[in-house]
């Protein structure tokens, strides 16, 4: 068998399988969660393929497929669900070939007695010691480190101000879109008591109001143009109906003259050429009437098409506004997450700066207690681990310095195989992901 035939055979087997999935073995058992980014490929419909991030509500949205629950399931299960939905939606004989790959894991966070607390990209196989090294290692007290903590706090405050500005801009944009939905000519915002929009300037409000006015004017002009077309067709129909009425009168006159001619013909007084001329005129009038009726029918059809175009323009505008609202809400969720992160970073930087001069000088005798804060479908859980414990995406790792005489790190079970290495046992309430 030729190599190309073998390839075709293998590809056919893949397409006939229930849901053939191809992705890295390291990600096979991983459970997805908010902020994970995945690449979805539907080989029969390349237009459906896309790179998506799991939303904070744990869902993904795909055309034709709809909204999918992604939180807490593997990429294999997600691909299977997409393939199954497409098969049912399109009444396919075989499920389409779908693959889902993890492009980027959601980040993890390191806080406490480390050189650089913050958010870090997750890599499979990361352990506590790895995370500690990524964060710059254990915190080492010095005047320079105190200055660095203060600098980090200043930088985080600057980033916080930027994100708060983005948040205000998004909220103002959302207010404008809601005004468009209600077909208002103004944005209902009171700058004296703005609530969540505190800090919005009159210039920012004027800019969004100008956008609202421009879009409303454009849509009103479009509607007015379509209404004008309907009126023009209606006037045309009126003129054509008047013409038909005139033709009908002419036809009655010709018919009367023809009738009179027949009477004279019976008496032998009628002129045959005159009768023939009247009959031709009657036939011509009938033809003109049919032509005018066709024009009236076309004008009425044009009115119907124009009214449908007006309805479609209205529906398209509503859909566009709804889509923009969803985009703004998604951006607000991301910005709010950034704000919360930078607020926590500021707090940790300030605490680190305040405590830097009380650090124990003897680095060799330092011991640390590690705590993981992990959120899953059952809630938020906190538990202490040793330095060999595995880190999962989304974990918040807290590193705390403890005195040497405090013994084992926070009540961990130490020992095993005579190595002196602590072994982590996750509490029963924390499900494996």
Image: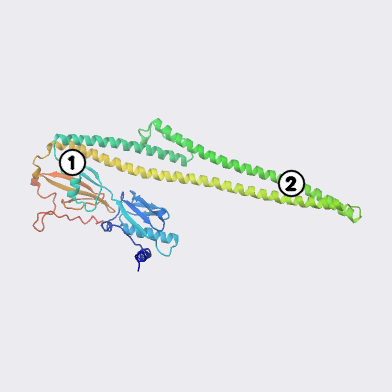
Mark 1 — residue? 115
Tag 2: Cα neighbours inside 10 Å, few (<14), some, or many (≥20)? few
Residue 262, image x, y percentages: 86, 54
Quadrant where the image shows the N terminus: bottom left
Q: CA distance from mark 2 to mark 1?
A: 94 Å
Residue 243, image x, y percentages: 72, 45
Quadrant where the image shows the C terminus: bottom left
- Tag 1 secondary structure: loop
Residue 308, image x, y percentages: 56, 48
- Marks 2 and 1, the one that precedes in the sequence: 1
Relative vertical location of residue 271 with respect to residue 204 in this rendering, above or below: below
Q: Residue at x 16, y 52 (%)?
A: 388
Q: Is residue 427 left or right of residue 333?
A: left
Residue 71, image x, y percentages: 32, 53
Does residue 178 appear in this view?
A: yes
Q: Is residue 51 left or right of residue 236?
A: left
Tag 1: Cα neighbours inside 10 Å, few (<14), some, or many (≥20)? many
Q: Residue at x 21, y 42 (%)?
A: 117
Q: Is residue 264 left or right of residue 419?
A: right
């Amino acid at each position: 068998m030729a190599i190309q035939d073998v390839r075709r055979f293998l590809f056919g087997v893949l397409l006939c399988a229930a849901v053939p999935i191809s992705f890295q073995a390291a990600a096979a058992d991983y459970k997805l969660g908010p902020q994970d980014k995945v690449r979805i490929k539907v080989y029969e419909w390349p237009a459906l393929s896309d790179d998506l991030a799991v939303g904070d509500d744990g869902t993904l949205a795909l055309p034709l497929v709809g909204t999918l629950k992604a939180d807490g399931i593997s990429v294999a299960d997600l691909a299977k669900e997409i393939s199954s939905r497409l098969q049912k939606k399109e009444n396919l004989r075989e499920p389409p070939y779908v693959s889902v790959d993890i492009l980027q894991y959601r980040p993890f966070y390191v806080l406490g007695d480390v050189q650089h607390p913050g958010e870090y990209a997750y890599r499979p196989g990361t352990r506590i010691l790895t995370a500690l090294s990524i964060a710059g290692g254990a915190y080492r007290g010095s005047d320079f480190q105190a200055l660095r903590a203060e600098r980090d706090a200043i930088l985080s405050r600057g980033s916080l101000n930027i994100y708060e500005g983005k948040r205000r801009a998004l909220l103002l944009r959302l207010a404008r879109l809601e005004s468009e939905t209600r077909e208002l000519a103004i944005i209902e915002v009171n700058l004296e008591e703005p609530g969540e929009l505190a800090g919005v300037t009159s210039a920012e409000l004027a800019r969004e109001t100008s956008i609202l006015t421009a879009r409303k004017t454009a849509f009103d002009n479009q509607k007015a143009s379509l209404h004008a077309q309907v009126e023009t067709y209606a006037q045309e129909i009126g003129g054509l109906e008047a013409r038909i009425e005139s033709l009908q009168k002419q036809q009655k006159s010709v018919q009367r003259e023809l009738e009179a001619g027949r009477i004279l013909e019976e008496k032998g007084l009628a002129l045959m050429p005159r009768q023939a001329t009247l009959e031709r005129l009657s036939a011509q009038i009938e033809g003109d009437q049919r032509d005018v009726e066709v024009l009236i029918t076309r004008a009425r059809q044009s009115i119907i098409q124009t009214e449908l175009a007006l309805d479609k323009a209205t529906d398209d505008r509503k859909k566009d506004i709804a889509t923009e609202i969803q985009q703004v809400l998604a951006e607000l969720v991301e910005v709010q997450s950034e704000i919360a992160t930078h607020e926590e970073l500021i707090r940790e930087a300030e605490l680190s700066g305040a405590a830097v001069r009380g650090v124990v000088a003897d680095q060799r005798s330092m011991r640390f207690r590690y705590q993981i804060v992990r959120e899953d479908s059952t809630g938020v859980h906190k538990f202490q681990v040793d330095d060999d414990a595995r880190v999962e995406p989304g974990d918040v790792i807290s590193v705390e310095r403890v005195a040497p005489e405090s013994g084992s790190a926070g009540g961990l079970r130490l020992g095993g195989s005579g190595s002196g290495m602590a072994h982590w046992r996750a509490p029963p309430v924390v499900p494996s992901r």
